[in-house]
Amino acid sequence: MISFSRLLQPLKSKIFLMIARSILEEVDNTGKTMRIKAECLKNESLSDIERMEEYGFTSYPPLDDKTENIILFPNGNRDFGLSIVSHNPDARPTSLVEGESMVYGKDSGSTFTNYIKISPTNDTITIETKDSIKIELTTDGTKQVNIDGADKINLLGATEAFLNGTTFDSWLTSFTTWASTHTHPTAPVGPVSPPTTPPPSGPTGHLSTKIKGE
């Protein structure tokens, strides 16, 4: 008499082989779909596994023996695997609070170094690099763009730069004209009196003394 458990054994084996938790070994990022090599069961190294990614987002997981993958094997066929999740516990940021999300990258031998963080709790989007250059876009009370840690800020490809609704070039032209033609009241001694005509209005109150124009 054939036991019921023996009849179910092939099905149980297939179910067992359908999902695997693995360690990432190699990455091939040259094709339209990333393919990986991973160690699943002990001494079971499987290659040519397709790594499926969400539309609009891609990543290259670190190869440091810490990156794990969840791999699906349709119908229990170990010759055809699909990686659906990649996770590296050493790189995962732990500073987030409820509701926040982050896109981050990991440098070799360190934790995350560059990131974009979205904080709905204080309406802020933060971009920061490993060199501590930080850009913050905030609408919490005031609509601001804050840039910190940058030695130089370049506007590349822009035909015009507006500050407080006035183009910088037009303001610079009028200011240059004023600077070369304005006069001061005669002052025999003491400090020079203020100019008889004020400088042209515009973005003067919003300009750093280090902003340059050509």
Image (cartoon, rainbow, N blue to C red):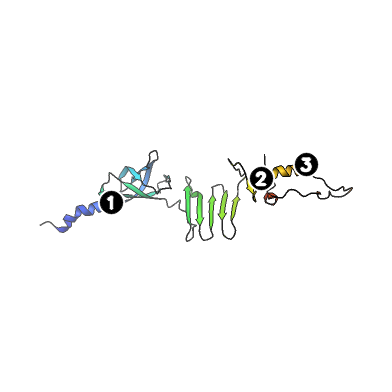
Q: Which-is-in-front pick, marks 1 and 2?
A: 2
The reply, left or right, for residue 176 in relation to residue 76 is right
For badge 1, the amino acid type reads Met
Which of disc 2 and disc 3 is earlier in sequence?
2
For badge 2, the amino acid type reads Phe
Residue 27: quadrant of the picture: top left
Label 1: how many Cα within 10 Å (few below 14, some 14–19, many 20+)? some
How far across and how far down the image is residue 148, in percent? 60, 50
Q: Quadrant of the N terminus?
A: bottom left
Query: Which residue does the numbered mark 3 point to in the structure image?
Result: 180
* Vertical relation: 146 (above or below) 154: below
Q: CA distance from mark 3 to mark 2?
A: 18 Å
Is mark 3 in CB contact (under 8 Å) with mark 2? no
Which of disc 1 and disc 3 is earlier in sequence?
1
Residue that appears at 22% across and 54% down: 12
* Label 2 element class: helix
Label 2: how many Cα within 10 Å (few below 14, some 14–19, many 20+)? many
Residue that appears at 69% across and 50% down: 202
For badge 3, the amino acid type reads Ser
Residue at the extreme left: 1
Q: Which of these two is toward me, 127 or 1?
A: 127
The reply, left or right, for residue 30 in relation to residue 157 is left
How far across and how far down the image is residue 2, in percent? 12, 56
Query: Which residue does the numbered mark 2 point to in the structure image?
Result: 168
How far across and how far down the image is residue 32, in percent? 38, 40
Q: Which of these two is toward me, 59 or 155?
A: 155
Query: Which residue does the numbered mark 1 point to in the structure image?
Result: 18
Label 3: how many Cα within 10 Å (few below 14, some 14–19, many 20+)? few
